[in-house]
Amino acid sequence: MALARSNARWLTRTRAFTGQVRAYSAPGDGTIPASKKKYIPTSGTYPLGFKAGSAHVGVKPSNTRLDDLALIASDTPCAAAAVFTTNKFQAAPVTVSRDMLKKRNGNGVRAVVVNSGCANAVTGKGGIQDAVRMGLETDKCFSNDSNGEDDGQGSRSIVMSTGVIGQRLPIDRIVSKVPDAYYKLGDTHEHWLGAAKAICTTDTFPKLVSMTFTLPGSQEEYHIAGMTKGAGMIHPNMATLLGIICTDAPVSAPLLQNALTEAITKSFNSISIDGDTSTNDTVAILANGAAGGQDITSASSKEFQAFKATLTDFAIDLAKLVVRDGEGATKFVTIRVTNAKSYEEAKQVGNSIARSPLVKTALYGKDANWGRILCATGYAGVDSVIPEQTSVSFIPTDGSEELKLLVRGEPELVDEERAAKILEAEDLEIKVQLSEKYEAEATVWTCDFSHEYVTINGDYRT
Amino acid sequence: MALARSNARWLTRTRAFTGQVRAYSAPGDGTIPASKKKYIPTSGTYPLGFKAGSAHVGVKPSNTRLDDLALIASDTPCAAAAVFTTNKFQAAPVTVSRDMLKKRNGNGVRAVVVNSGCANAVTGKGGIQDAVRMGLETDKCFSNDSNGEDDGQGSRSIVMSTGVIGQRLPIDRIVSKVPDAYYKLGDTHEHWLGAAKAICTTDTFPKLVSMTFTLPGSQEEYHIAGMTKGAGMIHPNMATLLGIICTDAPVSAPLLQNALTEAITKSFNSISIDGDTSTNDTVAILANGAAGGQDITSASSKEFQAFKATLTDFAIDLAKLVVRDGEGATKFVTIRVTNAKSYEEAKQVGNSIARSPLVKTALYGKDANWGRILCATGYAGVDSVIPEQTSVSFIPTDGSEELKLLVRGEPELVDEERAAKILEAEDLEIKVQLSEKYEAEATVWTCDFSHEYVTINGDYRT
């Protein structure tokens, strides 16, 4: 996002490539491409005691109409945790939100406030002041409600920004619109979807997931809901994306961080669009316990293990939506690497394949080029790779038998017709088995590299 | 190469993109694109006691006319060294050549034999037998000359292959043509250029460099000449390329390996086209001492230090030609990273920038997007990166003043008109200064990512 973006991104543009005409990037009128509509829920089950809202600021002067400020709030002070980008150039909201959570040990948080259109990254001390101010002005909205008393630990708001890098926020205009978003807070599906739309940049559709779950030894029905945005600059380690997850389960702050860190490893840090890790990226979770039940405070409890598993699955669903909306992507590819020495080694191989421009262009070209997959496996730099024990297959999405490309280091005679048919589908799974000695596995999700990716990212900033 | 390649690559194809019509990939008739002609020397100074030759095999059935077998030979047994791919999937010729050099400690080598059109990679035990046979059949050619006696240490030939992966060599046809290449050996510029052409795959022009040099304390004039091939799948660690360097300086085998390893670090392992490290890649050097002078056997001698510096500069010139011919490339970009803690850290930052699809597409789009350069600097994962001390500039190729984009972490107000003008040129230098505390630097060379790259690599194998 951030860096991938520039002005004039909300314009609808079409361009001819090799005979196709294709619209790319988010249309300026907010319309959703027909092929993406299926990913947008028409209803949802949202966590109790949370509300969502949005407002129009016009952070980018070209945006005269669409909401670009989102607010997600808990009715009561709640536990919160977050995972931030590992990029050395951390944007101001990353620094400010990290400090806020640390200062209050993840307790007493009320809200997440997000603007799109400007990343507030590489903006020096002024940028830090802007991010602090954005948080404090959000706090003010809550200072008059029954749970709004100052606990003396500073801001209660997580701040996020996404958009162009190297430009200061129009902070006066943003803070003047925070009350608008506050007054529009509500708990309907439309409120949540509105907030999910407001955090988008070049996303072609809003990304919102919700579900209910139960925990062992408890009668309560819990809810979890989340939104994310991404599109370009997506690679392991919190690249180019924002995510906000809310649950009404009663999970304590330290456990929330523990669960989120593990969930992110297997979800948002297991997706790759283009290998670029951005400056702003943050996934935060808020848990307010509004659905009742016993507080979850023991890391070894069955309840917590169940919550962590639920959160991981949920985060995977959310992260997959980012891959579905990869810039210029025409394919959704699941890379499953099995029989590695460790999860980390399996994932390193998966990332190496997911990041290879040669693999990604072959997928775009619907070419069953196992040689490139093998090559990327070979340079992943892990011990688990043993050439004469390596097998590569395509797993078709129609449930038909796997198509073996390489078996124990020996190329199969591939039925190219069947391979081509499998590659026609939008979804594909690539399975790479490493050594029979080992059993660990990892899954990574990625998309292909298309002409459109080059066009979207090669355009002049205007 | 290898993996990037497939059949029907030698066809001339043009395709329309956004109004341009552009030929890409190597034309089947061997004609050189007008813009690349300037990189092909019209004469050269070649090392004494070496000869080059080539022959037509038709490794790919579609190649009915162009030479695809090259032979480079020393009149006398000579010292040799090589650096091989680090990919775990090493092609048969890599294994065979490495074993050969090890067995004879880099002494007594006579020739390098190379085929293009098929990589002999992922071909199992049969592939190893083919590579061994290719070497032994080459040895036979030399068995009748005055220096041809068998020294009991096995093959004297380095074997290289480049082309499609996963297919067996047409080894009978290849070995039947080795004598042709032998009988065509000669020491003229045309002979060397012919061999340089024969090792090409999707290269659009042959890559050949030669020069003379002297060493301290010696009256002799020495010569060094080399050829290389590449195009796609180029990234540090001997990716997708072959290189053969010959010199008539009297350097002993162990020192030759020492000098080559250092030279490759700063040349062939400092270029990146697409981040893919291939299965076959090898740069070999032969030194026969034919120009006379004292043998160079001491690593600390002035002569050896001077030779190493010469070889490094020479290898850089050769490696740059590979970048000039990057698949679909429209830009030649020098990335100089200064003020790092170590050469390795500086290079890691350079590689991170060189590998970023967002940087590469911005360069293609002639966009002075310093944010993406900074972002890739930030995720390089090195300690030397200190945001508030980092500066980024463009160094124009016309000798005019540098264009500062970021100074000590603060964005400059960029003259976009001047930036656009600088980016119009084919050549560009990006300078990234890290921390004032440190002084190490590294240079990496790369190219941009274009629509053509996607087209070349996204095509169906046919």
Image: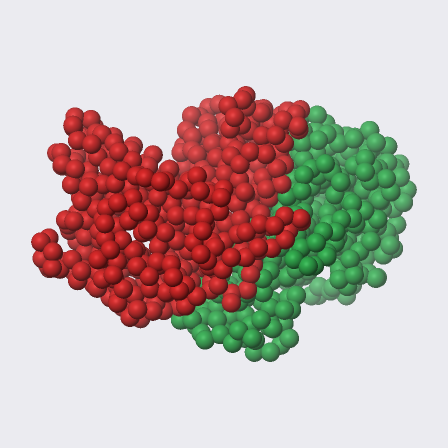
Chain colours: A red, B green
Where residue B357 appears, as percent x and y from the top left, is: 53, 53
Image position of A133 (left or right of B20): left
Between B145 and A17, which is closer to the camera in this rendering? A17
Task: Specify the farthest residue to the right.
Answer: B183
Q: Position of residue A411 (x, y in %)?
A: 64, 27
**Residue B207 visible in the shown view:** yes
Q: Residue at x 82, y 29 (%)?
A: B172
Image x and y of residue A301, in percent: 19, 30
Q: Is residue B210 left or right of residue A392?
A: right
Q: Is A430 in front, or is A191?
A: A191
Q: Please give the name of the residue rendered at 21% of the width and 43% of the height, measured from the top-left corner.
A: A287
Residue A35 on image: x %, y %: 49, 42
Q: Residue at x 39, y 53 (%)?
A: A200
| Picture layout, residue A197 above or below residue A394 | below
Taking the spot 16% from the left edge, 57% from the top edge, the residue there is: A142
Q: Is residue A364 left or right of residue A68?
A: right
